[in-house]
Amino acid sequence: MINKKVVIIGAGAAGLMAGGTASLLGASVTIIEKNKRVGRKIMITGKGRCNLANNCDVQTFISNVPVNGRFLYSAINNFTPADTIEFFENQGLLTKTERGNRVFPTSDKAVDVVDTMHSYAVQNGCKIVCDSAVELIIEDSAVIGVKCTDGTYYADSVIVCCGGKSYPLTGSTGDGYMLAKQAGHTITELKPSLVPLTSNNPDCKDMQGLALKNISLKIIDTNSKKTVYNDFGEMLFTHFGMSGPVILSASSHLRDIKDGKYCAVIDLKPALSCEELDRRLQNEFRENSNKDVSNSFSKLLPRKIIVPVLKRWGVPFDKKCNVISKEERRRLCEIFKEFTVDISGFRPIEEAIVTSGGVKTAEINPKTMESKLVSGLYFAGEVIDCDAYTGGFNLQIAWSTGRLAGENSAYL
């Protein structure tokens, strides 16, 4: 085991964890990274704060992985969310747990997570080289090395963990899928996940830049009328549609998306019942009795959404507040509680936080992360067909699969 050579493709979350782990076990590790700086994608996670894990138990974690969660049982049990928190604390990075059990570095700086992982790899003996992998070298159904743009690296084990296709500027350009295909692996359909949603509703463009906090969101299947997702939190209107935390999470639940199949229903006042909201409207109209209704919403709604609400209401903008009827208030309450926006599709995969799809899990040993087709070849991180909701779950997949691949790649 002392002299075993391991080559890792990709110095992201999974690659750095795998490299540091394999080195710690005595392997001679070379990490190939196309970027001059390691951990480029880690740097932009959590809006630059890096939501590095979710402080939950294993079963809760698995329930937050809608795509092939069961495949991860061994990896997550081997390196749990609690283990991840302890790992970073032992490396000298203090953490804190926030709403939704999201774990962040106390410093609120993603660069501290990157630096911690870089140190973990290098201090344990990893050699990091700036190069681009172009081909796996395979003989007799066993991987023996990696051919790169500037050199060839021979190895006893190779770990492919160079990400998916989301955020290509960070280096995730789909290289891992190409390498996996060379080894005979199946790549499932690649789709964006945790991605903004598009809409043909012109209201979105009119409300561009409007951030809504403390709203309730439901995504409805317009054919079955069933609610496929509901959440509470923040969202953002954009020129193309909608984004923000609850929208990104919702995108993971949408399948076979096409224009008109799904509809977003936003409760602008989730803390108020219909009766409470009606009393609030009565008070506002009473205080503004001689004003036009269009000038009476400043305390009720953000400025950018007032006109879209008035248009949907259908009451003349210059109608006086003191002549609004009970039936008109009822219709207005419905709009406040069910502000609907049709969904037309996803934004491009390049704008997604993670890629859904990847190396088929049935072709990977879940207890080791080793390929079932090629001996000595391992996979870890986003390149595998597993993806989770927002909240630190996707980075946990990277830490856990990277850890398991690193351990097993180092064994003789």
Image (tube, grey):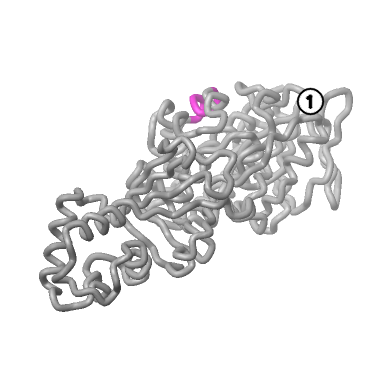
Q: Most extreme residue toward the right, as rendered?
A: 139
Quadrant in which residue 10 is drawn = top right
Question: Is 361 drawn above or below residue 354 in the view shown?
Answer: above
Residue at point 21%, 59% (across, down): 329
Mark 1: amino acid: Val
Where is residue 104? Give x, y as percent. Answer: 41, 49
Where is residue 137? Give x, y as percent. Answer: 86, 35
Residue at point 31%, 68% (across, down): 302
Camera sees residue 115: no
Where is residue 290? Give x, y as percent. Answer: 14, 78
Camera sees residue 109: yes
Which of the two residues, 331 or 412, is positioned nearer the viewer here? 331
Residue at point 23%, 60% (across, down): 328
From the image, give the main secondary structure of the stretch colored magenta: helix
Which of the two residues, 123 or 255, is positioned nearer the viewer here? 255
Residue at point 88%, 23% (across, down): 140
Location of the C terminus by quadrant is top right
Location of the N terminus by quadrant is top right
Q: Name the residue under label 1.
A: 374
Instruction: Please give the range of residues in magenta.
Output: 74-79
Is residue 108 toward the left or the right of residue 172 in the image?
left
Q: Is residue 75 inside the magenta stretch?
A: yes
Where is residue 94? Give x, y as percent. Answer: 39, 48
Q: Is residue 154 inside the magenta stretch?
A: no
| Numbered circles on residues, count | 1
Is residue 63 toward the left or the right of residue 1 in the image?
left
Mark 1 neighbour class, 10 Å CA radius: few under 14, some 14 to 19, many 20 or more: many
Question: Is 114 drawn above or below residue 69 in the view shown?
Answer: below
Quadrant in which residue 13 is drawn = top right
